[in-house]
Amino acid sequence: MAQKPSTPKGTRDFSPIEMSRRNYIFDTIRQVFGLFGYRQIETPAMENLSTLMGKYGEEGDKLLFKILNSGDFMRGVTPEALAGDPAPLAAKLCDRGLRYDLTVPFARFVVQHREDLQMPFKRFQIQPVWRADRPQKGRYREFYQCDADVVGSDSLVNEIELLQIIDEVFRRLRVRVAIKLNNRKVLAGIAELIGQPDKLIDITVAIDKIDKIGLEKVEAELAERGLDADAIACLRPLLQIDGTTIERLDKLAALLAPSQIGTLGVEELKTVIEGTEALGLEARLDLDVSLARGLNYYTGTIIEVKALDTEMGSISGGGRYDNLTGVFGMPGLSGVGISFGADRIYDVLNALNLYPEETGRSTRVLFANFGDAEAMASMKIIKQLRAAGISAEIYPDNVKMKKQISYANALAVPFFAMIGESELANGTISVKNMTTGEQSTVSPDQLIEMLG
């Protein structure tokens, strides 16, 4: 018995309706990126493993999909090597791997093409990435990332513009969001202020959970991670700052005044928040000193976006980094970027039913097939409609009308056109509105006007 066909675990097929919805998201993001002067690049699905390895930490390296070398790749491999540690064997058998994200390939691109790039360089990229992760709800082995980055500029104007991009994308998608902001320098200042600068990662990993587990449990975890009671007591007022965003900024500035790096972080946050609010924002902008995503590479602003009307993790995020290209021998190039989680945005739009009504509908009018002469007359009209930018098609077979109308209904085609004997003789078209059931007889020009 033949094996039932299936996709590999952690991957998905997308139907025409799903693809039209996904393209609605991608097209919206692409248009907004273009509006702000970001230019599209693409990088190959596979990169040299030397490019990818060591950039994502030990756990990330394990999640890379490696590609076997072509040809006689087993030559020189001993039985002992086959029975031993798989990591050195993989290094011998594989020179390439599927990209894990878009950031490392972008860094490689900038270094490789630096002579041809105008700095600052604003790029966007919308492509799939692959991770050999354990598949579970909302986590796939193949998924899309939509990234925008500007490199070669330290200006906080870039952060303000990226927040405008986030706001505009979600305004167009009609998703209400909260944009949470923090700064790595603020977190470093907090660690310095409580006398534990070497415990920055421990502190931030714990306080990042404050929304989920509450202050009391965060403090218990900090104690487990080696912070003494005085340090925890010193940290408490920083985590309990209240008031408006500007009031909280002022309180944070006062608390972090003894820390030079902390003060710099507050000043950067103030510039970004005041600049963003001066331009106007539909999204809710929140200062969140517990926000600690991407600490292994973010050096300044940290951004995270959450939907307000449905339970979902982060649907967009990003931040400032100071040395994107350093690992490829081009140190000191600062950049800032954001990434939209297309798959999670898709789930949000589905949950809130926010797709425009026409999404998923490609054909505007379907012509019935009454026979060879009528079909040829219909196809001449269809050519005129397509020239006018109106999507039209003909049912290919001369079968019972009930079957042809069922096909139109199944595809949610809004108009059904008929050229039968009398219409052929009169040079007219009978058109049925599939929503209202109304039927009218029109000329080709009137049909173009009706559907245009």
Image (cartoon, rainbow, N blue to C red):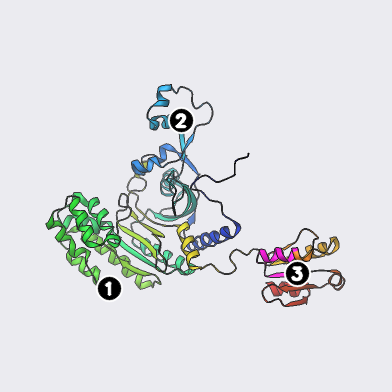
- Contact, CB < 8 Å: mark 1 with mark 3? no
- Which residue shows up at 60% across the image and 58% down it? 16
Residue beneath label 3, please? 417
- Which residue is at the front of the view, 77 or 41? 77
Which residue occupies the extreme front position in the image?
A: 1
Q: CA distance from mark 1 to mark 3?
A: 59 Å
Q: Amino acid at mark 1?
A: Thr
Which residue occupies the extreme left position in the image?
A: 230
Circle nearer the N terminus (1, 3): 1
Q: Secondary structure at mark 3?
A: strand
Circle nearer the N terminus (1, 2): 2
On whether residue 314 falls in the magenta region, the answer is no
**Picture quarter containing residue 344?**
bottom left
Q: Amino acid at mark 2?
A: Leu
Q: Secondary structure at mark 1?
A: loop
- Which residue is at the front of the view, 314 or 138? 138
Q: Which mark is residue 412?
A: none
Q: CA distance from mark 2 to mark 3?
A: 60 Å
Numbered range of the magenta stretch: 403-416
Residue beneath label 2, please? 93
The answer to whether residue 370 shows anywhere in this view is: yes
The answer to whether residue 256 shows anywhere in this view is: no
**Picture quarter containing residue 237?**
bottom left
In the drawing, does residue 425 fall left or right of residue 383? right
Q: Residues within 10 Å of mark 1 (few under 14, many from 20)?
A: few
Residue beneath label 1, please? 244
Q: CA distance from mark 1 to mark 2?
A: 57 Å
- Which residue is at the front of the view, 185 or 211? 211
